[in-house]
Image (tube, helix red, strand yellow):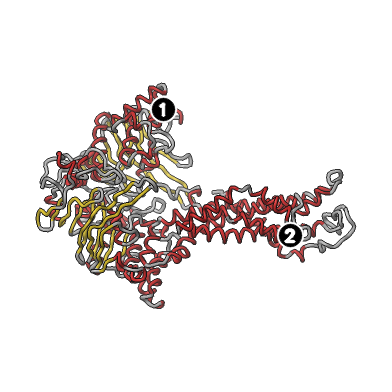
Amino acid sequence: MLEVDRLTKYFSSGLIQKRYLRAVDDVSFKIEKGRTLGLVGESGCGKTTIGRLILRLIKPTDGKVLFDGIDLFALKKRELRKIRPRIQMIFQDPDSSLNPRMKIGTSIAEPLKLHGIIPKDKRGKKISELIETVGLNPEHVNRYPYQLSGGQNQRVVLARILAMNPDLIIADEPTSSLDVSVQAQILNLMKDLQKEFDHTYLFISHDLDVVRIMADQIAVMYLGRIVEIGETIDIFNGAKHPYTHALLSAATMEPAVGQRKQVILKGETPGPTDIPAGCRFHKRCPRREEICMIKDPELVEVGGGHYVACHFV
Amino acid sequence: MIEVRKILGSIGLGILTIFVIVAIFAPHIAPYNPHQIYRPMEHPSSSHLLGTNDLGNDILSEIVYGTRVSLFIAFIVSAISMLVGTSLGLIAGYFDKVGFLIMRVVDVVLTIPRLPLIIVIASFMRPSTWNLIALFLIFGWLMTARIIRSEVLTLRRRYYIDATKMIGGSDFYILWRHILPNVVPLVVVQFIMEAIHVILAESGLCFLGLGDPVARSWGMVFHYAFECPTIYVSDVWMWWMLPPGLCIVFTVLGLTFVGYALEETFNPKLKSSFRRMEL
Amino acid sequence: MTLLRISDLRTYFPTPDGIVRAVDTIDLSIRERETLGLIGETGCGKTVLGLTLMRLLQSSTKTEGTIIYKGTNLLKISEAEMRMIRGEEIAMILQNPTTSLNPVMRVGEQIAEAIQLHQGLSKRDSKEKAIEMLDAVRIPSPSQRANEYPHEFSGGMKQRVMIAMGLACNPSLIIADEPTKGLDVTIKSQIVKLLKEVTKERAMLIITHDLGVARALCDRIALMYAGELVEYATTRKIFEAPLHPYTRGFLGSLPRNGLVPIPGMSPSLINLPLGCRFHPRCANAKAICRKKHPGMVEIEDGHFVRCFHA
């Protein structure tokens, strides 16, 4: 369903002396229909940028995105408009995902109005259906976002997305700002919806625990590159990249499977404007050696669909 | 809980309503035609509650009809300024390249000292109500454009704007349906501030003698009172100078109170309740 | 040795919509060099509890009960006396370092400020001490960074600065309000490691909703729901044998435990349910739970639960 091929995005700043912010650098992955790819990484790794690129909210510097075989960046405005409903995004902050001055019923109806798929008289019924599907009360239709909790607002967002019947949903940290128990509710809802409607998901998160439950495949990103990608089971039981080990042990406060010690990285992630030469991770890597400072490792296959970018596999 | 804002807002609204009613029903409220000549320099009596001016016009009638002029100028300048300012602000905030040009124009015009320029131009123009309105309009929209643009820049980043783009909403749809409604509170506040400014500026110009001598606003009544040589020697100032002055003061006060009360509605953070506390 | 004992603490806010019972009868104690975790979700009142301990709430709030710190009831002393305690005896590390640091003041000055106020050192001496503190929290090149402004620091660094500010006057008790909120996962583990060292010398009350952090740092944990404590025991007991349905539900809703959600939502602190505050969401709710409000009962040694059916 979705194929990302060598996607690259550099942000440039400055008129005279150009400085490049390499947000996304040569990223490639595939997601099959009905499956979920979890995109994991910390702040500044480029995961949000990838989401926005796929949605064509920003223009790429290089690379292609094929959605259901269609080259998204080659589309003209009118064709793009037709495709738009098929790819949707759930944002991190449910409160600013809805227009605060619009009743939620109106917000949900908006896509139906814009695309005229459903005639006016049948719209009310469709909205009630959607509200029920996401677990809200029918009386909420006339409320404003500020009257509902974060979890409820996120359900409204889901209802609105369902109104357009998308094929691909990009979820950008959908539950990061929610309480743990509410998170469980929303994630369960998303899983049920996926089963029912056969959605394809790109699930972006920094929380490995969540991604483990939600994703079939996981891609770990660092500073704009994918450093490890594979099936969820393989990543959790046999991660190979030192950064992945660090993430795993940080999430559980215990060593990762197959490792002896908990990995606590020193230092901080360098900003995307000063990306180190050679392997991007070498400055914080506990296993670094000479070669790491010179050569940037490529993704190498280490087992069925499991790729790692490190010199020591 | 005593809500000071609400009380002040109600008082302000009351004051403004009175003035608006007077302006609308002026012919029914004023005892005489303001241009009708009676005995000049009359003290207040039962037939002329505020006496007559140096020409013989009934002062009370002048003030009642003056309400029309003063309020009309203020509201029409504000209304048009808001329309122009908001439209330009919306465009400038949303479309960067055009916005750049618009903002530079705003920057340049803002460096010109407003009141001195108005005074200079007014002294060369034929004094009339419409000329004054045109003059105020040159400057009225500038701050609004700036403020609205700045708000639009913030609103653009909200996720629901992206969401609307994903649904397939066009730029103008987004501006009209999603950004404009969220900007309206600011526009209302700006409207009030501009109205206050215009009333005071217009009165100032009239005081200098640059106002319309035929359609006399409160400022002009005040001006003629001031020009009268015996104005302070006797008690004449009490019924010729004071009333128009008080009208100006109370209108501005009314507008200020309403603005103050509305400020809380539009900026809920100012509310004195704990509803939004982080628990 | 008990350092802090909270008895019968209540904090209410009168609002136009009703009285918000943010802290409704809390009993807690912290021993010297012990780390107590206060866990709860948004809207349970935990931050208010922290602010109450520091008497940082507005005068319109009503506080009742006693907070005995080293023999003194903190709620009865004057504001001037409380100011002596704040920073020097009890320090609070506030949530969200981005908004808790003054953006127009150099970082070193902000730390030095606390030192100057409490220890009366000269400007230069307190500046030096501030640099020492930055070093203690492992900020590289501390003397250089002390002259920088908060926006030049990353999120993790800012959190360290907040910790340095808290440690500046060597308090006996630190209250840390969500110290790892919003931080990247790898930075979080660094901060947790730092806090582990910090608590070797002093007591800490950690307010958080992150169970992983609590597990790594706390000796004992108290669960807070709708303004009151529902369970209170050693960390091991809480994770291995939780007794209260809310604790069980909370643990169960974690992704690694199966992502089983707790139905419903936390109650508003103005309209609390009658009887047990958790009963509308509890799978085991019986008739008595709807009518009577359970008290805190010691089920086994040191393990307290507020439930009729524990």
Image vertical order of residue B271 relative to residue C49, above or below:
below
Q: Which quadrant of the structure image shows residue C229?
A: top left
Amino acid type indicated by mark 2: Ser
Q: In front here: C297 or B183?
A: B183
Considering the numbered disc 2 on the image, is that residue within a helix, a strand or a loop?
loop
Q: Identify the chain of the residue marked 2, using the numbered disc in the image.
A: B
- Up the image or down, B25 lies above or below C233; here it is below
Type of residue at label 1? Met
Residue that carries the numbered disc 1 in the rendered image: C84
Q: Is residue B139 above or below residue A262?
A: below
Q: Position of residue C289 (x, y in %)?
A: 30, 54
Which dot marks residue B202? Answer: none
Q: Position of residue C95 (x, y in %)?
A: 36, 42
- Around disc 1, counting alpha carbons within 10 Å, would you say few (fewer than 14), some (14 to 19), or many (20 or more)? few
Give how far apart the Cα atoms at labels 1 and 2 are. Answer: 69 Å
Labelled disc at residue B128: 2
Residue positioned 55% across, 57% down in the render? B187
> How many tags in the picture?
2
Left or right: B249 with respect to A85? right
Residue A15 place in picture, x, y as percent? 39, 48
Identify the subunit bearing mark 1: C
Q: In the figure, residue C280 lies in which quadrant?
A: bottom left
Of labels 1 and 2, the one closer to you: 2
Instruction: Find numbered disc 1 in the image and state the secondary structure of the residue it sits on.
Output: helix
Q: Nearer the viewer, residue A174 or B215?
A: B215
Q: Is residue C299 left or right of residue A155?
A: left
